[in-house]
Image: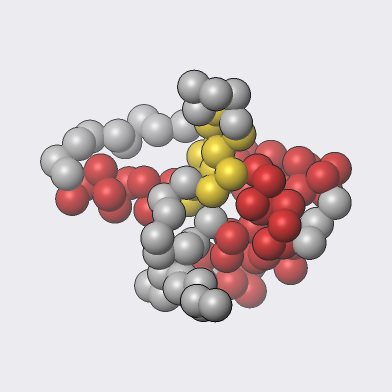
Amino acid sequence: MSSTQYETDLEWQVRHAEFERDHQAILLGCSRKRWMWTTWNKLIKTTGLTENNLLSRTQELASCGALIIRKDNDGRVLLALKERLKAWAKSEGIDIEDLQ
């Protein structure tokens, strides 16, 4: 069994005290090194939050600009940390300053 590796230099980790426990669980779930995007079902499994609680907390994180929520072509809900997307885009020379 392999262990999950997480990004360790993210802004939310530096400012973790500003986030509630549920928010931290979601942010950590979206911080896996191997995957930029995390599925809704994966977050339900990894955070242990109820679907209603996860919905309200992800909406809060999206409204404050920490989280990006999208649907893929198959209709699956995907979530990503905005700071990771911006860092990736910058490394690729892509301008996504207006990412919502």
Residue 26 image position (x, y, % from top left): 64, 57
Closer to the camera in the image, 55 or 72: 72
Residue at 59 percent of width and 24 percent of height: 75
Above or below, 36 against 63 in this view is below
Q: Is residue 14 left or right of residue 20?
A: left
Residue 90 image position (x, y, % from top left): 21, 47
Quadrant where the N terminus is found in the figure: bottom right
Q: How many numbered marks appear?
A: 0
Most distant residue in the front direction: 1
Residue 76 image position (x, y, % from top left): 60, 31
Q: Quadrant of residue 77?
A: top right
Q: Quadrant of residue 52?
A: top right
Q: Is residue 48 left or right of residue 19?
A: right
Q: Is residue 19 left or right of residue 86?
A: right
Most distant residue in the left direction: 93
Q: How is the image coloured?
A: secondary structure
Residue at 68 percent of width and 62 percent of height: 46
Q: Quadrant of residue 34?
A: bottom left
Residue at 46 percent of width and 71 percent of height: 6
Residue 54 image position (x, y, % from top left): 76, 48
Residue at 78 percent of width and 43 percent of height: 56
Camera sees residue 32? yes
Camera sees residue 65? no
Q: Is residue 64 left or right of residue 82?
A: right
